[in-house]
């Protein structure tokens, strides 16, 4: 099964109206090469830009449900536009990469040597005073002493379109 991230617009016009679902993730749709996007977190800023972060496995060939699944985290910013309420993407970026040592695979989130991949809880917030987006993720730090290895890490996106 191919899992994607969708948005719907909810607005009040003499009653509540819900738009058709619009796809957010920008990977190609290929029934022979299924990629899943899931666990989105969404915020909307004062100018109507929609900011979404989500987990994504488009770069990894794996079986759904297998243990040790590999994931990236993506950030998308765009707007809902037009009478058909389409999501127009201004930018899509991979924020977390499992291959930071590969010079052909640039990544935006410097995890250093200790994070073992993004956890299942992500967040996104818009800072109107700086026109920046802040993201956060859970993770684990195998170098932390003791049994509790959970960490929360974050990044700041400053070059918004």
Image: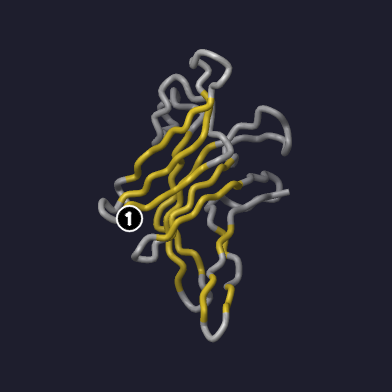
Label 1 packing within 10 angstroms: few (<14), some (14-19), many (20+): few
- Measuring 50% from the left and 13% from the top, which residue is drawn there? 145
Residue 99 coordinates in the image, percent (x, y): 49, 27
- Measuring 44% from the left and 50% from the top, which residue is drawn there? 92
Q: Is residue 31 above or below residue 73?
A: below
Is 29 or 78 nearer to us in this picture? Answer: 78
- Measuring 42% from the left and 43% from the top, which residue is drawn there? 135
* Count of numbered circles on the image: 1
Residue 40 coordinates in the image, percent (x, y): 55, 50
Left or right: residue 38 versus residue 46 is: right
Q: Which colour scheme is used?
A: secondary structure
Q: Name the residue under label 1.
A: 161
**Quadrant including the C terminus:** bottom left
* Secondary element at tag 1: loop
Is 127 or 73 nearer to us in this picture? Answer: 127
Rendering quarter of residue 93: top left
Q: Is residue 19 above or below residue 44?
A: below
Residue 133 coordinates in the image, percent (x, y): 36, 48
């Amino acid at each position: 099964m191919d899992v994607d991230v969708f948005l719907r617009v909810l607005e009040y016009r003499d009653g509540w109206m819900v738009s058709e679902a619009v796809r957010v993730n920008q990977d190609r749709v290929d029934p022979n090469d299924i990629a899943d996007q899931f666990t989105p977190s969404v915020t909307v800023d004062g100018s109507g830009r929609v900011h979404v972060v989500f987990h994504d496995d488009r770069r990894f060939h794996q079986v759904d449900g297998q243990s040790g699944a590999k994931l990236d985290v993506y950030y998308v910013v765009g707007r809902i536009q037009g009478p058909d309420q389409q999501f127009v993407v201004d930018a899509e970026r991979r924020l977390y990469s499992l291959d930071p040592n590969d010079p052909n695979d640039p990544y935006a989130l410097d995890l250093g040597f200790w994070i073992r991949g993004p956890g299942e809880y992500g967040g996104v917030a818009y800072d109107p005073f700086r026109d920046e987006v802040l993201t956060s993720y859970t993770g684990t730090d195998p170098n932390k002493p003791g049994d509790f290895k959970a960490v929360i890490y974050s990044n700041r996106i400053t070059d918004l379109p």
